[in-house]
Image: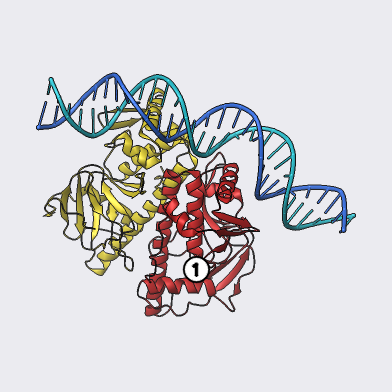
Chain colours: A red, B yellow, C cyan, D blue
Amino acid sequence: MKALEAGQPRPLSGNAGLVLNRLRKLAASEGHALDVLPRMMVRTMPARSELICYRQGIGSVLALQSGWAAHVELLDDGRRQFVQLVLPGEIIAYPNPGRSLASSTVVSLTPVEVASWQLDGEPWSLKAQMAALGASDEAERRCMINQVVRIGRRSAYERLAHLLLEIRERLIFSSVSTDHEFPLPLTQEIIADALGLTSVHINRTLQLLRQEGHLELRGGVMELQEVRRLMRIVDYRPLFPVPSH
Amino acid sequence: MKALEAGQPRPLSGNAGLVLNRLRKLAASEGHALDVLPRMMVRTMPARSELICYRQGIGSVLALQSGWAAHVELLDDGRRQFVQLVLPGEIIAYPNPGRSLASSTVVSLTPVEVASWQLDGEPWSLKAQMAALGASDEAERRCMINQVVRIGRRSAYERLAHLLLEIRERLIFSSVSTDHEFPLPLTQEIIADALGLTSVHINRTLQLLRQEGHLELRGGVMELQEVRRLMRIVDYRPLFPVPSH
DNA sequence: CGACGGTTTGACAATCATCAAATACAGTGG
DNA sequence: CCACTGTATTTGATGATTGTCAAACCGTCG
């Protein structure tokens, strides 16, 4: 039931960058202005750490300063399902008034830096923070809906392409990647457990997508080709409203 | 984008029963006392109505006074996935400060009565209401996690049994059914679209479960046999903490 | 009765899982 | 720098689960 033990917590010096930036954007989308966050602490943890544990109390806001994580569920015969990925910059969990127990377990998929801070401050600041967290929650919910539809009603081919498109969009939103390339530090087995497939099948599907010229993957960097076309092919709908131009 | 049009809204006379009862229980689990709700309106709608529509504004709390509904997603080639069922007594949607747009479409699966009321009142009452809605949200999130794991990592046999067990538990929690019987007014096609399978396969799996003596289904009433055993077989974990005794 | 929606059945095909082994790759210590 | 170890990827062969298509059946309602 303990978690978040590795690494010494240290105050965050320079860039609260990713996290703060993303929360600003989310707050803005709700019509709130978010300037600064309370003093952050950062803790480094290796891959496969439990960042939070189901039913554990949540005292502060936790976010991924860097690295990847996921909400995970295990069946008693060893089957594993990643319910939802948590990408760099995104919120891991936060204390929601009234329900401050974690509703699922979150593990790191890579080495991570976990930022944490108390949810407080001046009323106006707090309001902006809550708005940002609410918007984050909302986005998370949409991702989970995507996840259900992907797994429930799409072929392996579609699942994989759709997930990659979603990762791309979320990473772009958090300003960690540009239009056509993004880091993908996941093993094929992890991808499999995120998509309800086997790693063998992920491997073959990946090859197929590569053969058909939809993607290139070298050294943990994914490059999707002709994103718009791929979106049409697998019926991908943007999570965030597209800026009209 | 319009919704909730059929039926005349009428004030709820007698029993706000199910909904109120369930919210009371949820509030209590958060340490709040919920006595009464603001004046409710009830509206009757046929099956297949859109109760709320994705991105539609939500002005009041909506709950299922009676009947069944579901959050639904459609792919452009006609594939359908029910992301989550909404059972009698449960909340359909409510205006969350900061994010008051519906995050998915909800349709009725049977004729329904939709109760609605404004989220207001004395501060202490409002607080209790928010606590109840928060707890409802939390339960919903757990259901969605269940849904992802079911679809992602379980066989057809397990999926069906697991879903039935979940429906049973939720209906018991809302006091609409007793220990060993519950109404199941869903077609096999609806169940299929909830489980990411085809109706043909649902049919065969149902027969199998029946043959093995796990269930009996007559006239829309489901009777699960030896619930504890079935729970063990499909690794079902209760949504709500079991009252210790 | 006829029509309609839902269920049931059968034959067959496709997708995806399983198992096992080979290959590539990264880190570690000599 | 190289062998050595462990983990991740790739490949092949085979099988199980689930989907597809089509038709028959059944109950209800007009």
Q: Residues within 10 Å of mark 1 (few under 14, many from 20)?
A: many
**Quadrant in which the N terminus of chain A is drawn:** bottom right
Vertical placement of B215 versus B21: above or below? above
Residue at image point 44% right, 65% down: A95
Compared to B76, does A102 lie above or below?
Answer: below
Residue behind mark 1: A174
Q: Is residue A92 visible?
A: no
Question: Looking at this view, is B69 or C22 the one in front?
Answer: C22
Q: Between residue A86 and residue A198, name the one nearer to us.
A: A198
Residue at 13 percent across and 54 percent down: it is B9
Residue B109, horizontal then vertical, whole percent: 26, 43
Quadrant holding the C terminus of chain A: bottom left
Camera-side residue: B245 or B58? Answer: B58
Q: Can residue B99 be seen at all in this image of the molecule?
A: yes
All told, the count of numbered labels is 1
Q: Amino acid at mark 1?
A: Ser
- x and y percentages locating residue D19 in the rendered image: 42, 35
D2 lies left or right of A82: right
Give above or below for B54 relative to A149. below
In percent of width and height, residue B52 lies at 26, 55
Q: Quadrant of residue C8?
A: top left
Q: Is residue B151 above or below residue B132?
A: above
- Residue B29 x, y percent position in the rendering: 35, 54
Pointer 1 chain: A
Q: Secondary structure at mark 1?
A: loop
Classify residue A70 as left or right of residue B204. right
